[in-house]
Image (spheres, grey):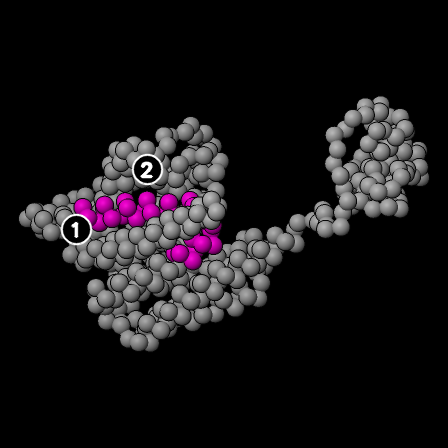
C-alpha cells in the first residue's frame, strides 16, 4: 500500500510539473515573439534571461532549502560545465533568432527534425545501425516538416537554420545533463545556477561588442518605453521558471519519458502560439506540423524498444527456475591449502592451488577433476549447476572461473 501511494504521489508530481512546464514555456515563447517584433535584439534578450537565472537562483534556492554546492573537480568543470554553458548561450541566441525570423509554430515544427540528425550522426561518427522501426519513424518526420516548410507563409532561411541549430545544441545539453550530475552528485538546480552564471560572464564581452551600443540608441530605451522593459523583465522571469521546471523534470524521469514530454510540450506551444499570436496558417500547414510531431513520438517509442532489446541480448543468463543452488557460509579452510580433500560444504579443493588440476565445484553431484592438463601451471575452474559435467582445460590459458 505504501509503495502504491509513493508511486501515485510521484506520478502526480511529474504530471503537475509537466503541465506547469507547458504553460510557462508557451507563455515564454509568446512573450519572446512579442518582444522581438518590437525590439529586434536576440542577443540582448538572451543576456536578460541569463542575468535573471544568475540573480534569482541564489537567494530563492537558499530559501527553498536546495542542497548547497559540492566540490567540483577541474576535470568535471571543463568536461561538463564549460560545454554546457557555451551550448546554453548559443542555443538560447539561436532560439531567439528563429522565433524572431519565423512564427513560433514553425520554429517548433522544424525542431522536430532532431531524430533525423541524431540517426545520421550516430551512423557517421559511431557507426551505429538502427532498427527498421527507427528508420521508418523518420519518414513522417521528414514528410511533416517538408509539408510545413512548403506551406509556411512566413518562411525565412535564417529562421530555418537557427531553428535547426538550437535543438541540436539542446540535444547535446540534455545528454550531458543526464550524465553530468551523476559524477559529482551536484543538485540539478545548483547546476542551473552555475551554468547561467558562467554563460553570463563568458559572453558579456560579446554582448557589449555586438549589441550594447545599438540597444542604447533604440527608441524603446531612449524614450523609456515601459512596455518593452516590462516585457523583457517578464520574459526573464518566465525563462528562469521554465529552466527550473525543465531541469526538475529531466532529473526525475527517464530519457524516454522526457523526450515524450518534450514532444507533447511542442504540440502545446504550437497550439497556444497559433491561438494567441494568430499566425497565418493553412490546414495543410497544421497537418504537416501534426505529422512531424507524431513522427517524433513514434521515433521515441522505436528507440525505446530497440534499446530494451539490446539490453536483453547483452545480459547472459545466470540462473533458471529449476536450479537447486543453496548458498552456505564457507566453513572449511581446506579449500585454501590446496589439498584434494572434500570440505564440509561438499566442495573439492581448488585445483589451481596445486598447479595442475582443473577442479570444479558441482551442485548436485560428486566432485570431479579433469587432469588432462596437469602439465600446465594454470587451469580453469568450473562452477556447475548440473550433474555429470566434464571440464576440458585449455593449455597455457590463465586461470578462469566459468559459470554454467
Mark 1: give few (<14), some (14-19) or many (20+) Cα within 10 Å.
Answer: some
Which residue is the site of mark 1?
A: 231
Pick whichever of labels 1 and 2 is earlier in the sequence.
2
User: Quick check: can you spot residue 229?
Assistant: yes
Q: Residue at x 24, y 36 (%)?
A: 55
Q: CA gap, disc 1 to disc 2?
A: 23 Å
Which residue is the site of mark 2?
A: 193
Q: Is 218 on the left or on the right of 399, as rendered?
A: left
Q: Position of residue 11 (x, y in %)?
A: 41, 51
Q: Is 123 on the left or on the right of 389, as rendered?
A: left
| 101 over 44 or under it: above or below | below
Q: Position of residue 109 (x, y in %)?
A: 35, 64
Q: Residue at x 52, y 68 (%)?
A: 136
Q: Nearer the viewer, residue 6 or 53?
A: 6
Q: Position of residue 203 (x, y in %)?
A: 29, 40
Q: Is 378 on the left or on the right of 2, as rendered?
A: right
Q: Say if the magenta span includes residue 238.
A: yes
Q: Residue at x 63, y 53 (%)?
A: 312
What type of secondary structure mainly makes up the magenta span?
A: helix
Circle 2: element type: helix
Q: Residue at x 80, y 35 (%)?
A: 399
Q: Say if the magenta span includes residue 111.
A: no
Point out which mark residue 121 bears: none
Q: Nearer the viewer, residue 343 or 80?
A: 343
Q: Is 56 on the left or on the right of 76, as rendered?
A: left
Magenta stretch, residue numbers: 233-262
Amino acid at each position: 500500500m505504501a509503495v502504491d501511494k509513493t508511486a501515485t504521489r510521484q506520478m502526480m508530481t511529474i504530471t503537475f510539473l509537466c503541465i506547469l512546464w507547458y504553460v510557462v514555456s508557451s507563455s515564454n515563447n509568446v512573450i519572446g515573439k512579442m518582444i522581438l517584433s518590437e525590439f529586434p535584439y536576440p542577443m540582448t534578450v538572451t543576456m536578460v534571461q541569463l542575468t535573471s537565472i544568475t540573480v534569482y537562483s541564489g537567494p530563492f534556492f537558499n530559501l527553498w532549502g536546495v542542497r548547497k554546492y559540492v566540490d567540483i573537480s577541474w576535470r568535471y568543470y571543463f568536461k561538463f560545465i564549460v560545454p554546457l554553458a557555451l551550448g546554453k548561450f548559443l542555443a538560447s541566441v539561436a532560439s531567439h533568432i528563429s522565433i524572431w525570423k519565423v512564427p513560433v509554430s514553425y520554429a517548433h515544427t522544424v525542431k522536430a527534425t532532431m531524430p533525423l540528425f541524431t540517426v545520421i550522426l550516430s551512423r557517421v561518427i559511431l557507426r551505429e545501425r538502427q532498427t527498421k522501426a527507427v528508420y521508418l519513424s523518420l519518414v513522417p518526420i521528414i514528410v511533416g516538416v517538408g509539408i510545413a516548410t512548403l506551406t509556411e507563409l512566413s518562411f525565412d532561411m535564417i529562421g530555418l537554420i537557427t531553428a535547426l541549430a538550437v535543438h541540436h545544441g539542446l540535444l547535446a545539453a540534455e545528454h550531458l545533463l543526464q550524465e553530468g550530475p551523476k559524477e559529482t552528485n551536484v543538485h540539478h538546480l545548483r547546476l542551473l545556477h552555475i551554468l547561467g552564471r558562467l554563460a553570463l560572464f563568458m559572453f558579456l564581452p560579446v554582448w557589449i561588442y555586438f549589441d550594447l551600443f545599438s540597444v542604447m540608441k533604440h527608441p524603446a530605451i531612449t524614450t523609456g518605453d515601459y512596455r518593452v522593459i516590462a516585457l523583457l523583465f517578464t520574459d526573464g522571469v518566465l525563462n528562469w521558471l521554465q529552466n527550473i521546471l525543465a531541469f526538475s523534470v529531466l532529473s526525475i524521469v527517464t530519457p524516454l519519458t522526457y523526450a515524450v514530454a518534450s514532444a507533447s510540450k511542442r504540440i502545446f506551444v504550437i497550439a497556444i502560439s497559433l491561438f494567441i499570436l494568430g499566425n497565418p496558417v493553412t490546414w495543410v500547414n497544421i497537418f504537416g506540423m501534426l505529422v512531424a510531431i507524431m513522427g517524433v513520438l513514434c521515433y521515441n517509442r522505436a528507440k525505446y524498444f530497440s534499446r530494451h532489446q539490446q539490453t536483453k541480448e547483452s545480459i547472459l543468463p545466470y540462473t533458471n527456475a529449476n536450479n537447486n543452488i543453496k548458498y552456505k557460509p564457507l566453513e572449511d579452510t581446506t579449500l585454501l591449502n590446496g589439498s584434494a580433500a572434500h570440505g564440509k560444504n561438499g566442495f573439492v579443493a581448488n585445483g589451481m592451488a596445486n598447479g595442475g588440476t582443473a577442479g570444479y565445484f558441482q551442485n548436485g553431484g560428486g566432485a570431479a577433476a579433469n587432469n588432462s592438463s596437469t602439465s600446465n601451471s594454470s587451469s580453469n575452474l568450473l562452477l556447475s549447476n548440473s550433474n555429470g559435467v566434464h571440464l576440458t582445460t585449455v593449455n597455457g590459458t590463465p586461470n578462469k572461473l566459468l559459470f554454467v
